[in-house]
Image: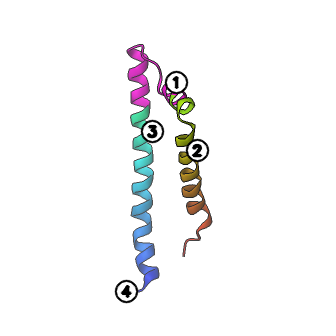
Amino acid sequence: MNDTAFLTSTFRPGMAGFVLAIFLALWLLACMELICEVMDWPSIGYRVQGWSRDNPPYVATLLVVLGALLAHFLWNPIT
C-alpha cells in the first residue's frame, strides 16, 4: 500500500474524531457553566481570569504551545 492511499484513508475518520472531541469539550464546558450559574458559583471565565492573573508564566507557556499547534495545523500542507 502506498503512503498516499494510507493518508487519504485515515484523514476523514481522524478529522471526524478531532471535530467530535472539540465539540464534546465545548459541550462539557457549557454544561459546567450552566451548573455554575444554577448553583450561583463564580463562572468558569471568572475562575480562568483569576488563575491567569496569578500565574503569568504558565499563561505565556500555554499561549506558546497553542500558537505552535495552530501553526502546525495551518502551515503543514496536506499531501
What amino acid is labelled 2 in the image?
Ala
Q: Residues within 10 Å of mark 1 (few under 14, many from 20)?
A: few
Residue 40 percent coordinates (x, y): 42, 13
Q: Residue at x 54, y 76 (%)?
A: 79
Residue 53 percent coordinates (x, y): 57, 30
User: Where does label 1 land, which residue?
Assistant: 46
Closer to us: mark 3 or mark 1? 1
Q: Residue at x 62, y 65 (%)?
A: 75
User: Where does label 3 land, which residue?
Assistant: 26
- Height in image: 46 above or below 71? above
Q: Earlier in the sequence, mark 1 or mark 4?
A: 4
Q: Residues within 10 Å of mark 2 (few under 14, many from 20)?
A: few
Quick one: SS at disc 2?
helix
Q: Residues within 10 Å of mark 3 (few under 14, many from 20)?
A: few
- Height in image: 47 above or below 16? above
User: Where does label 4 land, which residue?
Assistant: 1
